[in-house]
Amino acid sequence: MLRLRPILFLLILLVFAGCARRETPSEPIRPAGKGTMPARMGFTIQAGAFSKAENAARLTSRLNREGLSAYYFVYKTGLYKVRFGNFKTAEAASERARRLVDKGIIEEYWVVNPREYAIALKDEKGEDYVRDEIVRTARAFIGVPYLWGGDSADEGFDCSGFTMAVYQYNGLMLPHSSRDQSEMGNAVGRSRLEKGDLVFFNTNNSGKVSHVGVYIGGGRFIHAPGRGKKIGIESLDGKYYSTHYAGGRSLL
């Protein structure tokens, strides 16, 4: 089975609407204290080599319709590649990949071993290593345009697709919804946030979490702002985000 060397990549994935800004202030939300920690990823399939993100996005959507959680990223050569699925064994992953080849959905593929993920090295290299890799992954998104839309305006699927992909690439499963993500892990006070934590916002004045980003230190976070905008860095001290801040969570 082929092994992948660690790569710095850009990903965007099965992301749906729900992270648009609204300018009316509202009371910050206080997510619950302690929740379920993310499960670790199993074997994943990697396929595709596209020169345009739009083509990778189409494959991602097709795989999602097959019931496979998929995202794409920019490989070090500049080509877009797609990762999908979560399997207990390499054999199960290969069997599913062969069926997709037979259906003409993918061509060549390889199976990513769970040992490739940053989380697999936590015991050896420490938690700070995993946090650094999560931030490195998130930074690789900067400047990537938002290309997808969806049909759920209050669940936060745009931004949570981004955070889900960042964590999944590093070996940790997250739910698709920003609201569900806000109920995982441990609550962290704003002054105690660490790199790689998730930060949450109420951007639709519903009284519920509707937006999420990855904290990168220094009071800043990376997020997917929504349709027509590019993934970028914002400050928690900015007027809009400080007003709509809803709390932070540590998932490590």
Image: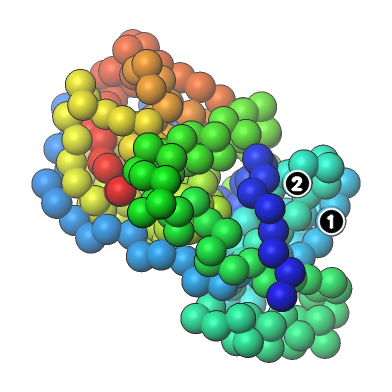
Q: Residue at x 55, y 83 (%)?
A: 89
Q: Residue at x 64, y 49 (%)?
A: 6
- Residue 251, image x, y percentages: 30, 48
The vertical placement of 89 against 162, above or below, is below
- Residue 79, image x, y percentages: 83, 46
Q: Residue at x 49, y 51 (%)?
A: 118
- Residue 140, image x, y percentages: 62, 34
Which residue extends farthest front? 124
The amino acid sitting under disc 2 is: Tyr
Judging by the rendered image, the residue that carries numbered circle 2 is: 75
Left or right: residue 148 versus residue 121 is: right
Where disc 1 sits, the SS reads strand
Whether residues under marks 2 and 1 lie with C-beta atoms below 8 angstroms apart, the answer is yes
Judging by the rendered image, the residue that carries numbered circle 1 is: 49
Structural distance between the alpha carbons of marks 2 and 1:
9 Å
- Residue 92, image x, y percentages: 60, 86
Closer to viewer: mark 2 or mark 1: 2
For the residue pair 127 and 24, the one nearer the viewer reads as 127
Left or right: residue 52 versus residue 88 is: right
Q: Residues within 10 Å of mark 1 (few under 14, many from 20)?
A: some
For the residue pair 155 and 223, the one nearer the viewer reads as 223
